[in-house]
Structures are given as C-alpha cells and as structure tokens.
Amino acid sequence: MKNINKIFSFVFILFLASCADNEMTETSETNEPNVGPFYAEFLACKAGPDFNQENVAKMIADFNQLNISEGVTWVGGYAPVEGQNRYAGVNGWWEINWESKEAAEAGWKEWMADEEAMAWDESTNSILECDNSQVLGWDFYLPGETMFEDWSSFATGTLECNYNEGKSSDDLKANIEQYNKWVAEYGSDDDYAYGVYFPQYEAEQDFLWLNWHGDMDSMKAGNESWAETGQSIQAEFNKTATCTGPDIYNSAEIYSPESS
C-alpha cells in the first residue's frame, strides 16, 4: 500500500465523546462495555486527473486481486461530504485494520517488496494517491453492540476530542455505559455501530469517536432521536471532553478477507 487509493464515508452525530489515556480496558467480563483494542492506520488521499466512478471501481477490484497481507482484517474508504468536513485539500481517507501493530509493520514490508502491488500502486496514482509517508496509527475499541449487516456502503460522522481538565478514560467509560443504555432503549433497527480511536503517535486529539450508519437518512434519524432523548447524556459527555465536528463522510468497504 505505498500510495493507496480509496473512497470512504463516515456519517452521524451531534454528540461528544472522549477516549482513554491512550488506552481503554480490554473486555474481560460480559458486562464490560469496551471491546478491543484493535489496530488501525489512516492515510490521507487526493484525487488525481483520472478520478471518476468507473476508474475507482476498477482500481478497487484490481486491489482485491493482489496478494494482501493476512494481517489485514479490513480496509475502508471515507469521502468527505462537501461543506460538512474541515479537511480542505484531502479528498478522502483510507483506513486499514490490522491484527496488530506488528502485523502492520510486516505487512508494509511485504507490500513494498511485491512487484504486482507496486505496479498497481503506480498505475492508480492518477486516480487516487494516498500518502504512505504519513501513516497514522490508532488503537481502537468497539464498545457497543455492532448492529451492522452491510458495510459495502455506509455513512460516517467523526468527532475529534480532547479530555477536559481533570478528566480521563474512567470518565469516558462511564459515559459509554450511559450511551450504550440509551442505544438499547432508543435505538432503531437501522444499521449502526461506533468506535473510539486512541492515537499511537503525537496527535492533537486525545481520541476520535466515529459513528457509522447504514446511510445518510438513518444518520439523520439517529441525530434527531439523540437531540430529543439523549441530551442529559450529552451533558455528561460535555463534562468529560471537548470535541470538534462531526466531519461527515460517505463511506465504503474496500476489502474484507471474508468477501475476497
């Protein structure tokens, strides 16, 4: 994945969240809300002169035919929604989920030594070019029940958060427990999941909170429900962390071992 090409989308949310002191407790009991950690990397991407739907579809199809590392567990893309995203000059993000950081390091070495991968990389730079010199590593958790049947296309809302003075992961975990109860009581049958990401590099943010919805309509409905019934929990989130966003993305699955 030297220069990696993709489309992506993240959508949802009015609400703030916060993430651990770079780490949340791994799940050990059934009533523990945190699941993880898993390891993810993000790459910023820019569209080239040959960027169009047909070329992107072929690019992704060709990518899935390559010798992708067994350490890769999922790849997705996020395309910013115009007017609802702060990242000017970035046409999207590529997210690669790995079994571990060590698997990522080994996988990149394999990729760089693979002639077919390098040829694909070079041939797709005019469509979408992703900067692998700025690979951003994150540990992430899936603290709630994942109610998602189809990741082929989805919507994402991303919040960038910093702990307020005196607050920590303990406060965040209490917020998450409250939020999970709210989802259980007020959630719909629409596809929904969320993740909390902690940077493994010197980042401005203490954590990211990502909300994934089946589509923009279900994201809108979720936001409306939260505005009507979740504001007492929102107030507790606000005590824990200050967040910017959400940045809204159209998102899609690029690669999954189960479907390739």
Image (cartoon, grey):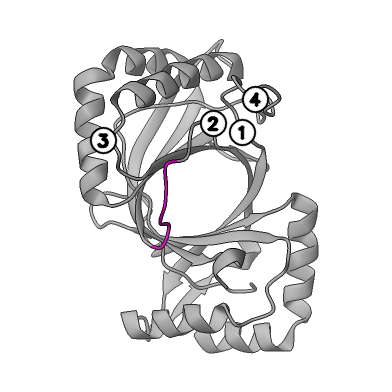
Name the amino acid type tagged 4.
Answer: Asp
Residue 143 tag number: 2
Q: Which residue is mark 1?
A: 35
Judging by the rendered image, the residue that carries numbered circle 4 is 21
What's the amino acid at mark 2? Answer: Pro
Q: Residues within 10 Å of mark 3 (few under 14, many from 20)?
A: many
Q: Which residue is mark 3?
A: 222
Q: Residue at x 23, y 52 (%)?
A: 83
Name which of mark 2 and mark 1 comes first in the sequence.
Answer: 1
Disc ID at residue 179: none
| Image-based side of 3 in relation to 162, left or right | right
Circles 3 and 2 in contact, beta carbons < 8 Å:
no
**Upstream in sequence: badge 3 or badge 4:** 4
Along the line of sight, which residue is nearer the eye, 84 or 35?
35
Q: Which residues are magenta?
A: 147-152
Instruction: Nearest to the eye among marks 1 and 4: give it.
Output: 1
Identify the mark nearer the N-term, 3 or 2.
Answer: 2
- Looking at the picture, how far across and down is residue 246, in whole percent? 33, 39
